[in-house]
Image (cartoon, rainbow, N blue to C red):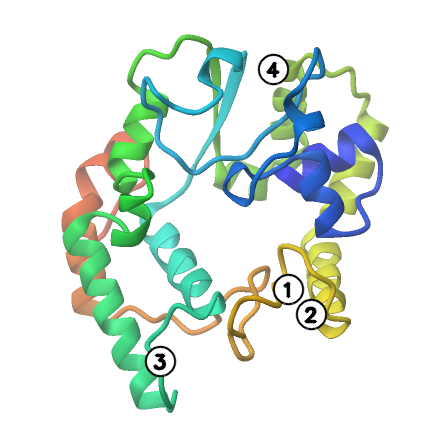
Amino acid sequence: MRFLLANLLYGQIASTAALQEMVPDIHRGLVGHQIHGSRKTLIKTHWRFLPDLPLREDTIGAIYIIRDPIEVLVSNLNYVILRGEQASGPQNESVKREFERRWIDSYIAQGGYQRWREMGFGTWEENLRSWTEDPLPYTRLVVRYEALRSDIAGTMATVSRFLGIEAGEAKLQAAIDRSSFAAMQALEEAEIRERRAGIFFDPAQAAGGDRRFVSGSARDPMSAAQREAALQRFGPMMEKLGYRPQAES
């Protein structure tokens, strides 16, 4: 979504450093000109909404993206490993698989990643409820991740209207093309290969091996028992959102 909006508003974004400048991630820090004066700035956050949310009094609207919680779990695991948060020491396949197993079990038991819960993100359900069900002091738009995949043009037209952006079909399509999976994957590979600091390459973080954030992990890290446990944990909200969990046969 950040790439889509940045490419729509500012033209082609050539680096993730430029993306952070145009549509900053509050968890990576903000600089004065991004929030000073009358400029309207799109800011990404993973925090759940609370009355003491930073910049809440300056916020005029929110776009919240929902996604199948089991896919969120797998994506979060891939990100944690990519950022080098797995156990230290020799990382043979057995050690990696054991880290994944323990991490997934903990995530399901707690409803989210413990470290991120402590950072104010809440559980998956707490985060979702705070932005989509609880009263907010400003308008909101809820977007399904799956809609971005199945009808990206229609979804982005809705997002543009919500933001008050005048964007014709050609302008929207250009932003979509510049934010495609292939384009983002190529940028990720280039930044890692050239060691350009940004979202895809952080010299201060341990390397995640062959993993990539855009492409994700092709292997399903969850066992049948873990998937069933996840369905039990998140099933009621999944059904409410229209995700139909099905138990493993």
Q: Amino acid at mark 4?
A: Phe
Q: Mark 3 sits on what residue?
A: 88
Q: Is residue 238 left or right of residue 163?
A: left
> In which quadrant is the N terminus drawn?
top right
Label 2 or label 3, whichever comes before in sequence order: 3
Q: Amino acid at mark 3?
A: Ser
Label 2 or label 1, whichever comes before in sequence order: 2
Q: Mark 1 sits on what residue?
A: 201
Within 10 Å of disc 3 (Cα), the crowding (few <14, some 14-19, many 20+) is: few
Q: Which secondary structure lies at badge 3?
A: loop
Which numbered marker is on residue 182? Answer: none
Quadrant in the rendering for residue 239: top left
Q: Mark 4 sits on what residue?
A: 162
Q: Mark 2 sits on what residue?
A: 192
Quadrant in the rendering for residue 196: bottom right
Q: Which secondary structure lies at badge 2?
A: helix
Look at the picture and state if 202 lies above or below 65. below
| Discs 4, 1 touching: Cβ within 8 Å | no
Label 3 or label 4, whichever comes before in sequence order: 3
